[in-house]
Amino acid sequence: MARLVISLPTSGRPQQLIETLKRSSSNLALDNTAIVVHMDKDDQPTIDALAAADIDKRILASCKERED
């Protein structure tokens, strides 16, 4: 079975991110669907908010250095 991965880049809006993830996770009907949140390594408020949030286990984080 194919897997659906939704990529969600974010920067500097931790509260909006958590609200979006909570709304979106209710639509994850299949276990093989995931949301990957892409954030910059220097965006500590977003990293902290995501770590503290009670969200679906299919929401994954990707934290890397900015390319610019």
Image (tube, rainbow, N blue to C red):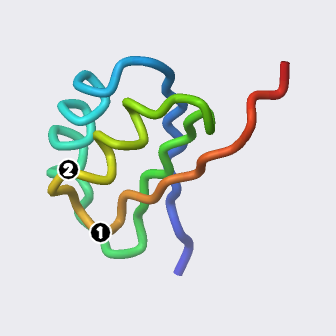
Crowding at mark 1 (Cα within 10 Å: few <14, some 14-19, many 20+): few
For the point 20% across and 50% down, which residue is it? 53
For the residue labelled by badge 2, is the local secondary structure a helix, a strand or a loop? loop
Query: Quarter of the image holding residue 23?
Result: top left
Q: CA distance from mark 2 to mark 1?
A: 11 Å
Crowding at mark 2 (Cα within 10 Å: few <14, some 14-19, many 20+): few
Q: Nearer the viewer, residue 13 or 21?
A: 13
Please identify, in this view, whether the residue under mark 2 or under mark 1 is nearer the observer: 2
Query: Quarter of the image holding residue 14?
Result: top left
Please tell me whether residue 11 is drawn above or below residue 9 in the rendered image.
above
The image shows residue 45 at horizontal and vertical percentages of 38, 30
Please tell me whether residue 51 is drawn above or below residue 20 in the rendered image.
below
For the point 50% across and 51% down, which residue is it? 36
Label 2 is placed on what type of residue? Answer: Ala
Please tell me whether residue 53 is drawn above or below residue 68 in the rendered image.
below
**Residue under circle 2?**
53
For the point 32% across and 53% down, which residue is it? 51
Q: Residue furthest right?
A: 68
Label 1 is placed on what type of residue? Answer: Lys
For the point 49% across and 27% down, which residue is it? 10
Q: Nearer the viewer, residue 48 or 68?
A: 48
Q: Quadrant of the C terminus?
A: top right
Please tell me whether residue 52 is drawn above or below residue 21 in the rendered image.
below
The image shows residue 5 at horizontal and vertical percentages of 52, 56
From the viewer's perspective, tell me whether residue 32 is left or right of residue 30: right
The image shows residue 67 at horizontal and vertical percentages of 83, 27
Tell me the number on the disc at residue 12: none
Q: Nearer the viewer, residue 60 or 66?
A: 66
The image shows residue 20 at horizontal and vertical percentages of 25, 31
**Residue under circle 1?**
57
Q: Nearer the viewer, residue 52 or 10?
A: 52
For the residue labelled by badge 1, is the local secondary structure a helix, a strand or a loop? loop
